[in-house]
Amino acid sequence: MNSFEYASPRSEQEAVELLSAHDGQTAVLAGGTDLFNLLRAGCIAPKRVVDIKNVETMQGVSAVSGGIMLGALTTLDEILVHPLLRDYGSLVQVADAVHSIQIQAMGTIGGDLCHLPNCWYYRNGYGLLGLEHGQSLVEEGRNEFHAVFGNRGPAKFVSASRFAPALIAWGATARIVGPEPEQVSVVPLEYFFVTPKSAEQGVTVLKPGQILTHVVLPEAREEIVSASYEVLQMEGLDWPLASAGVRLEIVDDVVREARVVLGHVAPTPWVSLDAAATLVGNVVDVQSAEAAGGAAVARATPLSENGYKVQIARTAVKRAILRAAGQLEGALT
Amino acid sequence: MAERKFSWPARSETTLIGKDIPRIDGVAKASGQAKYTADINTKGTLFAVLLTCPYAAAKVKSIDLEPARKMPGVKSVFPFKKEKDEIRWEGDLVAAVAAERTEQAEDAVKAIVVEYEQLPFFVDEADVKRAAFADRTKGAGGAKKGDVEAALKTAAVVHRGHYGIATISHMCLEPHGSHCGWKDDDLEAHLSTQNVSGTPGQFAEPLGIDAANVTVVSDYEGGGFGSKFAVGEWGVACAKMAKEAGRPVRLMLDRATELKIAGTRPSGYADVTVAADADGTVVAWDSLHWGTAGIGGGGVAVGQMPYPFDFPNRSTAQIGISCNTGPNQAWRAPPHPQLCAMTQTALDDLAAKLNMDSYDFFKKNLQFTQFGKAEVYAAEMEIAAKAIDWKKKWHPRGEGEKGAVKRGLGMALHTWGGGAGACTCSVKVHPDGSVETFLGSQDIGTGTRTIIAITLAETFGLAVEDIKVNLGSSKYSRSDGSGGSITVGGVSGAHRRAAQTALWQIFDKVAEKHKIESADALVARGGKILNGKKEVCTWKQACSLLGVKPLEVQGEGPKKDGLTSERVGGVQMVDLSVDTETGLVRIHKFVAVQDCGLILDELTARSQVLGALIMGISYSLSEERIMDNKTGRYINADLENYKLPRIGDVGELVAIMYQPDSEYDKGVVGLGEPPVISPGAAISNAVANACGVRVPILPLTPKRVLDALKGGKA
């Protein structure tokens, strides 16, 4: 690991200023559960690491007008037990499915959303896009854990975020500060993620000197239910083979509004309007959930080794829907 | 006086043998007081970091170590490779740096400049046609018996199938490595080894010193499953760097390098034809095998196929594939797990084709098992079936639940030698009654210290806490390395002989002093010497008769005196569920019924079985080496992608030790390896029973399960 400067700001503005130095060749340290892996593997070599743990405004969960605001430093443990999040079932389910008590204690929601891909080509030094001599190693290489959607361009990794599908389904927004210290922007979380055309683009809209400070959730209402379903091979710390987050508005047993978002199937969280459309106007049952699962994966473009992920993604969508409606039975977890 | 014969106490009279005795070093290990090689940090220790090659095949065009030598904190730089040397697998060692701090060594390693010429490579071990096209195949033997062709023609049912089991890496908690320090010309090497007595010479020869100048120490061992018999080039390098620096050096392999070069279990793939009469009696076996053990080709030795059966007509042939992958090292019960997985899956498919309950089918064919274990297997099958409720839960293949999650049962059986290894020990009984022993064996985590203490304490009528066991130094008397499940027999036999010999001498002195007619009437129990039920004196008083010097007796083994024996069986049955919509497999209950002759410590014995089941579940469901055909690299050489089970993945494990009097009377037989053999076949068979489809290749990952279900091939 290369030597780097260490900075520990106390405010968002100070953090942004510190991150803007060195032409943005800086890295954010929050929980640190993945940053050290990246540093040690040489995947990133920042000139400065900015430890944001002492920025108080970025911590904790609070009620705001029209919803709930989560500081980017909110830990998974806090999400698991916070009374304000009790009605956001899908979020709690994701935090629970992380299984590792160490990650739950240290990992943050902001760190999860900014998590770099776990693609083994990236982690073994072939860059974000997994290239050798300008050619994709993923295409003809070992791609069993890679993308089955959005993979026609050079990026074939899957988005590593566990929480994004659930949060996007909830219609969450991201609050971003920087690169000017007082500059604040708010974007729907769906548009926070990007599929890079080049390694320099990164996996989010964050530009050098920008930082994700908060995630804002709209109000939970009685007629809204949500759930997440992650297919995890291992009981211990493991990455989902595919996942789904859903949010349904159900009135008189009929779905009035639906959001279905898949995870770990594409370079970004993958919103399925098709799956949502099959649900609206229908009653949730095994048939409608299955139809939604089928619709969600109908346009998948699997690579040479990951056709099985299409089936897993279909199942994740179906089961997330059934789980949201309290109808999930007979699944092996 | 009656003839004095070495023997174990009558089963009804044991006080410690066969009970549940916790490890005597358990607290030291759990509290961190026990120091492993990776913990040794004597004053002035330098820390070494390795530079490895990222290519599967390359030639070193040039190597410049000078920049590393100039880096801060660096005290020694060692080249494994020089100009023009060839590298034939990724991860091969290129250089090492020893520095004041690990971080400095890491920086210095990065400063080394190596120019490689990349060479063509081949790493596709599963595809024999591609391998043949790439000229990477070589015949690796086979065997024939009877007339397979004729038997196939007349058989009632013939089954043809493809089976396989992927390569896995050794994955000890403590990686390979050593801490080496010099005092003048004497080397003291703390070594993570299964072979304390056998390693001084491995240091001495390349270092150009006498083996007498080398002391190898291994007080505690963070696991050894067959890959830790050699010092390794990294061990020699550690000693050389320590010499050059004039300071101790610690060099442990990093996890990725451990996975890539420190030893793998060869892969095995096979096309099998197997046939039976209408009643399920197997009449013919034919199999063509391929796989790799690394650059040398080889693969799984198939001499014992079909395992462990000897059908009247059989034929096997093996093709070795030379791959640019790290070398293989014996892996717990080599190569039985692979043989079992390639045999008993095919047999189970044949049973399904015959519409027979797998239990009945295996039972019918026990007549063909080798080594005369048929009766033991039959008894063990009955016990296992009862424990897992086989007859109630079994259903014809694929005819269980209607929903997405389907439950199934599977079984397999195995055998292993486990005869006693060579051991010499020096047992000292001090005049104050304290007892200690010295031997150049090692406790690789299997409870060797504890079973030695049990053997001595049982013999002398003491408690295990009264015994001091000194092992793990090559300066003690010679013992074999711990491999082949030979240690328990080796050390217990030698210690029983030494202890009985010492006890007889003490009894003679007691008889003389207390004017007892026959010393043979005496027994040692509860810290006392008894004549019948009457106390003659305490153990301490008896030992005081030794005078001022301790009584020292050497114990040796193995001997053919009945204390130890060989050859075990073992039957395993598993109850699991398959989620046919996600490909996940979850174990509900895994029952292992295991014999191993006389059991010294039931608790330790069950622990061995449980550990083996966990290891078996690992290679059956998730653990495998994944080679990348594009880069030639071991692409999952990290603990995120090299998937090992946690406790939540293993379900309910049940270890039942099968020990009727006939087993007790056999004497001690090794246990460490056999219970790891059957899980692959048992789990694969249960998955097939559950979902109606054979998933041909282990481990049974969600991908393989879903691909098999999609193919729908039985």
Image (cartoon, coloured by chain):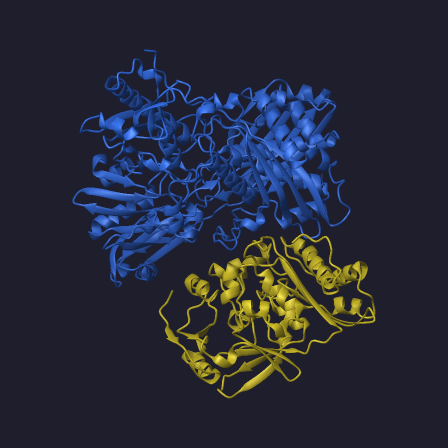
Chain colours: A yellow, B blue
Q: In this view, which residue lies farthest toward the bottom?
A: A182
Residue A259 percent coordinates (x, y): 72, 71
Q: Is residue B644 above or below residue A328?
A: above
Q: Residue furthest front?
A: B534
The one nearer the camera, B129 or B646, is B646
Q: Nearer the viewer, residue A249 or B118?
A: A249
Q: Nearer the viewer, residue B700 or B166?
A: B700
Residue B368 visible in the snapshot: yes
Q: Residue at x 76, y 44 (%)?
A: B401
Q: Is residue B457 left or right of residue B601?
A: left
Q: Position of residue B139 (x, y in %)?
A: 52, 31
The image position of residue B284, as x and y in percent, is: 65, 23
Q: Is residue B544 left or right of residue A61?
A: left
Percent of width and height locating residue B110: 35, 60
- Give the total number of marks visible in the rendering: 0
* The C terminus of chain B sits in image quarter: top right
- Relative to B301, A243 lies left or right: right
* Quadrant the N terminus of chain B occupies: top left
Q: Is residue B394 visible?
A: no
Residue A179 vs B451, above or below: the answer is below
Residue at (48%, 54%) from the top-left corner? B638
